[in-house]
Each structure stands twice: as structure tokens, then as C-alpha cells.
Amino acid sequence: MKTAFLYAGQGSQHTGMGLDLYNAKPEFKEAYIEAEAARPGILSAIFDNPDNILMQTEYTQPAMVAFACGVTSLLKKANITPDACLGLSLGEYSALAAAEVWNTEDAIRIAAFRGHQMALAAKDGQWGMSAVLGLTPEQVSSCCQEGAFACNLNCPGQVVIGGEKNAVEESAKKAKEAGAKRCLPLSVSGPFHTPFMKRAADALQHFLPSFSFAPLKTKVIYNTTGDDAGLLPGEPCKDALIDILTRQVQSPVHMQSSLEHLLQEGYDTFVEIGPGKALSGFIKKTASSLGISSDQYRIITIETLEDLENAIKELS
């Protein structure tokens, strides 16, 4: 059995996420307390969500990483550890925390900074994102008008475009004309993973060196490369990771390539640490495109206390 932990990205957050874990598990609660210290008001955002502030990226990002770190700590307490980690966009920070590059406190602090800087980078524009279904990445890229970019290559038949709102809308029209089955506008607050995030990338490049980066304890698959970028567990990785994370915020997410890499290396157990189950769908579509049948792998999702308890039983 080869096990990969997969970490959700921004967009799957919801009011009350992790409440049962928070009330039942001190280790999980500790991660949320760290998030409150990094972004005061985040507990109210998670549990009460006044004015829908949990959707604001300054709150979403540390909240999602805190959820991931809390669940990962409980799995490790049960002696369940991954052979590889992969995260979607923001989830890459959760993956690096799982690989013990950072402790929980630092991972959440970095996520809070990243979220704030991405919000600043998006502050003065009109932005949009749209999921294009039924075209290849090459076809979608050819439809992108000036100011729009293919920014999330999620799985076969699903590519997200992002950028200036009008450009994204025009690009979506072109995609429909090119044969896209559907183009679904997404509710987002910025042009994430496009060159419009350069301000956030520059800020990260100056901020990240102030943190310690421990050698990887396990392999991580990176959004920018779709593989392990040649970074081996146990080796110094700080400079390389700063470069990867600086590029990641303003570059396309190659999720399909990342999942193909894991499947082709024989990974057969995928633990999606939510909230949400978007990555499970990406795995199924990617595996199918490779001719891998559903009986050759399993997916375990963890979003609730019951999910966690069932996962520990299944993986022990």
C-alpha cells in the first residue's frame, strides 16, 4: 500500500467546518487556537461567519490550513503517516506542514500572510474565474483573451481560467464556441495563480526567508511542476521551496499532472483531508483517463469526527 495525503484548497470552506473535531479533540482545537492568534476573529468566522467573512481570503487561508494541520496531527497520533503529500493551491502549504517542513504555528502564520497579500494584490481590480468543462488545457489556453489565463489544470476535461473579469467572460464565450460543454463562473475574490498575483509573490519572497524550513520528512508533489521537483526527503530545501512557493501563487496549478504522477508511481490509497471532496472527483477522472479502474485504488475523505474515526480504523 502506498498512501498519499491530499489537501483541499480555497473554495471548500464552510461555516462550522471542524466544529465536532474542535469540541472532541484537543489537538485539533490547538490548531484552531493557533489560527485565532494569527488572524484574530477567525474562530468567529469559522463557527458563525458574520457577513460571510470566511469567504474572504485573509480568513479562508489560515482557517483551511488550521483544519488540515489539526486532522493531520490526529492521524499521526494514530501512527498513520503518508508516503507522499499533495495539496491543491493553498493546500500545498498544508502538505508541507504534513511533511514537517514547518510546525503548525508557522504554517498557519505563513498562510495568514499569504491570504492577506493575495487580498491586497486583488484589491483594485475587477476579477473573475470560470471552470471550463470538456476541453483540453491547450484548447482552453487558445481561447484565453488578453488579461485571462488558464490557471488551474484540475483533471481531464476541467480547466479553470482566471484574470480580469471582462477578459474571463470573453474567454469563456470563446471556449463555448470551441466546444466546451459548460463554463461555470466561480465565486472568487481575486485572479489567483495568474501573473496578476505578482505583488503577493514578491511579498512572499521577502517574508518566507524569516522562517525555518526543516528537511522534508516525506515526498511532496508540487503544483508548479506536477512532480517532486527533485526535492528528496532529508535534504536541505529552504531556497528551493521559497522559489517554488513564490512562483506557485502566480503560476498555473498542475493538479492533473500531479495526480498522474502519483497514480503512475503506484499510489493506491488517497486520503483527502477536507473540508470538501473536490479532489476525490479529480482522482477518479484522472485515474480513468489513465485506464486505472476504481478497484485498483481507494479514496478516504476526512471532513468530520466520524470520518476521522472511520479513516483510522480503515488505515490502521
Image: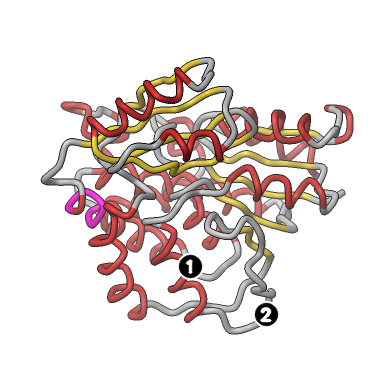
Q: CA distance from mark 1 to mark 2?
A: 18 Å
The image shows residue 189 at horizontal and vertical percentages of 25, 37
Q: Earlier in the sequence, mark 1 or mark 2?
A: 2
Q: Identify the residue at image location x=65%, y=50%.
A: 258
* Number of the label disc, if any, that sits on residue 259: none
| Quarter residue 297 falls in | top right
Q: Which mark is residue 244?
A: 1
Local secondary structure at mark 2: loop
User: Between tags 1 and 2, which lies in front?
Assistant: 1
Residue interval drawn in magenta: 116-120
Look at 60% across and 64% down and name the residue there.
99
Residue sitting at the far left: 124
Rendered image: mark on residue 234: 2
SS class, disc 1? helix
Task: Locate residue 114, reporting x and y percent.
Answer: 31, 58
* Above or below, 223 relative to 287: below
Residue at the (63%, 36%) spot, across then down = 308
Q: Residue at x 47, y 81 (%)?
A: 239
**Residue 222: x percent and y percent?**
57, 59
Amino acid type at mark 2:
Gly
